[in-house]
Amino acid sequence: MIYSCCIFVYCLLECFKRENSINYIMITILLGFSVAVTVVYLLWTEPVFHQVMYGVLVFCLVLRSMYVVTWVYPWLRPLCYTSLGVFLLGFILWNVDNLLCDTLRAARLRLPPVIGAVTQFHAWWHIFTGFGSHLHILLSLQTRATYLKRRPRVKFICGVWPMLHAEPRRRS
């Protein structure tokens, strides 16, 4: 989670740079942060530490996303807000699962298996986080492709799954 979120942070921080530029300083900082979090977590196996460090990265993503959709590309607000909303819904369900774990387990024993499976809120956290991350990747790609004048468009596979299509730059 930490490493992939650092990649998201890098992409959003670098989305307005010239083509083929690489910010080695930012890569070093984010890689150092990831390795430091890993080492500290291996030595001090406190889940709250890992959650807080992940929260710091998500906070950076939210701040940068808000900047992009407020000041640069306001027409991307729906995609940004949907991404953040889906991610937040997963986060809420995960915390409900953490707080009510014993109660939910006891309820699952009395419920039919199909309904019991739906109450696995930790699983929903992964589903919503995955979809929210996918939408956030689309936001990042659309921001970058727009900046590079690639005329990006969101297309839907089977009318459901959003994907980005960017056309090559027109030669003048």
Image: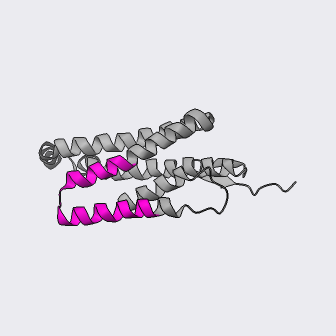
Q: Is residue 139 above or below residue 85?
A: below
The stretch drawn in magenta includes residue 40: yes
Q: Is residue 136 visible?
A: yes
Q: Residue at x 67, y 59 (%)?
A: 19
Give the residue furthest to the front. Answer: 25
Q: Give left or right: position of 91 versus 152.
A: left
Residue 162 painted magenta = no
Work out whether residue 39 or residue 90 is closer to the camera in this orientation and state it: 39
User: Residue 101: x percent and y percent?
Assistant: 16, 46
Which range is magenta?
Answer: 28-57
Which residue is at 52% across, 64% downward?
24
The picture quadrant where one finds residue 2 is bottom left
138 lies left or right of 168: left
Q: What's the magenta bit mostly, secondary-structure-wise?
A: helix
State the image coordinates of residue 26 (x, y, percent, origin top left): 48, 58
Residue drawn at (47%, 54%) of the image:
8
